[in-house]
Image (tube, helix red, strand yellow):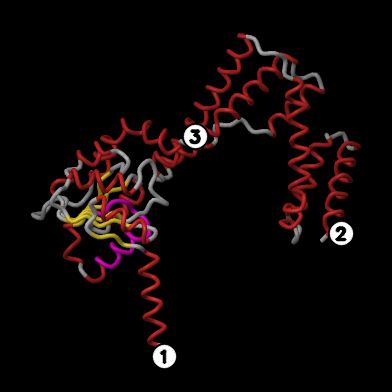
Amino acid sequence: PELVLISSVAWCFIVSGIAERLGLSREMGALIAGLSISAYPYGSDVISKVTGVRDFFVTLFFVALGMQVPVPNATILGQAALIVAFVFVSRFVAVVPTTYFLREGLYAGTVTALNLAQISEFSLVILKLGADYGHVSDRASAVVLTAMILTSLVSPYVIGANDRIARIMLRPFERLARRRERAGGPAPDAHPAREIVLLGHFRIAQAVLDRVEQLAPHLKGRITLVDYDATRGRAVMARGFRWEYGDLANPDALEHLGMEQARIVVTTISDTFLKGISTRRLVATLRRLAPQATIVMTGEEKADAEDLLRAGADHVLVPGEITGERILTLLEKEK
């Protein structure tokens, strides 16, 4: 392992030196060396071993960059803010329409655009090369560096709150999404519109729909799936089920869906996958909106089940417990 590490580092320096001799930069040579190592069978092992060295030199690189940034004045800060605004807007313009036309939904595109808001550190390498060749002025370098620092400071908070920000930004489109997704959907029938409500579309909900389709197709018209993913909504309606656009973290959205009509409400996702709300808060909201309904929640552990029952749930399903019971049954059959 040590020989592999030493050979990889030596290869990096050799390629960097050759690149400089050929008129390229040492940085580009290092990039080419890294690309060649990634194709090597032991590439992942090399990456794990050079992580500490990499972080050390990256830290020194940013220290050197920080020392080059002059004390920002109002003009530099204003221009840097314009660059940051352009980066944010350009991400949305480039990503959101693309995901929308690919039928991945507005939510996925908005979250992706928020996660891509930071200016890449590799752009600083290009900036430094431009400054060394005299193609980029010191003032332009200062503005770009300041903009990169601003996005680096803001992006961790934006990424951490991307779900909440995306839901707030998409609320004006909820009504439009409902109209679009209802178009071409199954016609209303004699059953109550939301007699059985499934909240969230993930593995458990998919399994429920599959079992209903196979064993109880007469229940299709009585089941309404509530989720924010438009792509899955089309697939659900194509199978004959009802689908409604809804944000589980927004009590107002659930209220507008007419939850008071429901006889059974099943939340098929646990806290691991819920964003912007917890199962405890959700069950309280459901109990308020549908006091007569039978509420079924999904928990992760026994303690969650007890808390949810106290919060107002009628039944709590713990997938781990159900799986354990099933495995025990199989083991007993093998005796």
Decide which of 72, 245 is in the foreground and name it: 72
Quadrant in the picture for residue 218 = bottom left
Q: Secondary structure at mark 3?
A: helix
| Three-letter code, disc 2 | Leu
Q: Secondary structure at mark 2?
A: helix
Neighbours of disc 3 within 10 Å: few (<14), some (14-19), many (20+): many
| Three-letter code, disc 3 | Leu
Q: Residue at x 36, y 61 (%)?
A: 302
Q: CA distance from mark 3 to mark 2?
A: 42 Å
Residue 255 in the image: x percent, y percent? 20, 40
Neighbours of disc 2 within 10 Å: few (<14), some (14-19), many (20+): few
Neighbours of disc 1 within 10 Å: few (<14), some (14-19), many (20+): few
Number of the front mark, 1 or 3 = 1
Q: Which residue is mark 3?
A: 114
With 294 as the anchor, is 316 left or right in this view? right
Query: 58 above or below 267?
Result: above
| Image quarter (top left, top right, bottom left or bottom right) of the N terminus | bottom right
Residue 47 in the image: x percent, y percent? 73, 52
Q: Which residue is mark 1?
A: 335
With 12 as the anchor, is 295 left or right in this view? left
Give the mark nearer the N terminus: 1 vs 2. Answer: 2
| Image quarter (top left, top right, bottom left or bottom right) of the C terminus | bottom left
Residue 203 located within the stretch drawn in magenta: yes
Decide which of 301, 139 is in the foreground and name it: 301
| Three-letter code, disc 1 | Lys
Q: Residue at x 40, y 66 (%)?
A: 320
Query: 241 above or below 23?
Result: below
Magenta region, main secondary structure = helix
Query: Which segment is the magenta one?
Result: 198-212
